Amino acid sequence: MNIENIEAFVYVIHYGSFNKAADVLFLSQPSVTARIQSLERELDCKLFDRMGKQLHLTEQGRRYLPYAQQMLQIYQKSKQQMHPNKALPNELRIGCTVSVSNYMIPEILPGLKALYPDINFKLSTGVTDDIVCKLLNKEIDVGFVRNISHPNIESVKFYVDPIRLYVYEGHPFIGDPSVSIEAIAHQPLVFFECGALDWMKIHRVFEKLEQPPNIQFQVDNSETARKLILRKAGIGFLPGLSVRHEVQTNKLFEIDIPEITGTALQTNIITLHGEHSALLEQFQQLYEREKLTL
């Protein structure tokens, strides 16, 4: 029996839909559907019923669920027993930046909890320098920070979040394929920056203009910037993860600006050299299914 099919079944139940399970597993929705159908053929029964947009377990599905969860846990534990030096701790202490805490950790932890129900998670937020200090002092096991380099730390790229210009519903830039930097500079701007070098690239886009950009709100928190733009206080440049839901629900709209193509925020996972290396593998396996790049 294919363990990936069992995994898809457990995740669909845990997240309540094929689409959400596909997002977490970094598969397409048809791939998750195919895995469920394959499992149903192996079991010779139907596991789900659809009623409109609602998804319900069949009686056979309810009976099978505890066995599926147990098989998935046994599989993970068997992998750990084969490599005991890679075993995860009973409590996983995670340090991360505020943006990771807001937009990424809620996507990751439920999946890890589903795979490792015996692990407790302890989360703390802070700026990159503070998280690095906590790691060096062994106050946390793993950190999510901006790209750094340190001789005692193993740092691996986790994801790259493109920075784009976003405008609110009804804004005249929507549908305009040739929005200029000059036109953007005249608009009321909500300017969020976190001190990373990539934000300097945004500043440099406006340097050649005769007049400085019309920055009416300058904030250091992406949530504040997002809410100001939603309230039509201005338009602004934001990391894609911070506005993913608003873009999907057509509350905010991305405007293509060639001058900032390639501008992005990189987040790395960090651990001490020689310690908790398995944590890097676990997070990457969860978040890089199908080699997905954000």
Image (cartoon, grey):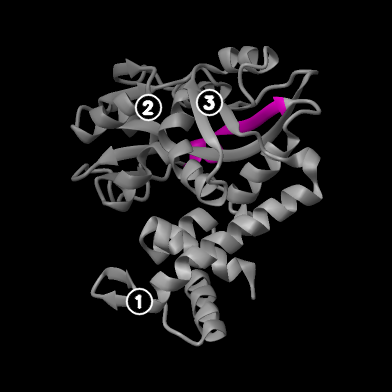
Q: Secondary structure at mark 2?
A: helix
Q: Where residue 188 sits: x, y (%)?
A: 25, 25
Looking at the rendered structure, the secondary structure element under dot 1 is loop
Range of magenta residues: 258-271
Q: Looking at the picture, tell me which residue is in the foreground, 8 or 238.
A: 8
**What residue is at 64 percent from the left and 57 percent from the top?**
74
Kind of residue at disc 3: Cys
Residue corresponding to mark 1: 58
Dot placed on the residue nearer the N-terminal end, 1 or 3:
1
Q: Position of residue 12 (x, y in %)?
A: 43, 63
Label placed on residue 290: none
**Quarter the N terminus occupies:** bottom right
- Give left or right: position of 209 versus 186: right
Mark 2 lies on residue: 222
Label 3 Cα neighbours within 10 Å, binned few <14 / some 14-19 / many ≥20: many
Residue 63 shown left or right of residue 229 in the figure? right
Q: Is residue 164 above or below residue 213?
A: below
In-front residue for pair 102/59? 59
Residue located beneath label 3 in the image: 96
Q: Residue at x 33, y 46 (%)?
A: 245
Q: Is residue 8 visible?
A: no
Viewer-proximal residue, 228 or 185?
Answer: 228
Task: Verify whether residue 226 appears in magenta.
Answer: no
Q: Are marks 1 and 3 in contact (CB under 8 Å)?
A: no
- Tell me the crowding category of disc 2: few under 14, some 14 to 19, or many 20 or more residues within 10 angstroms, Cα based: many
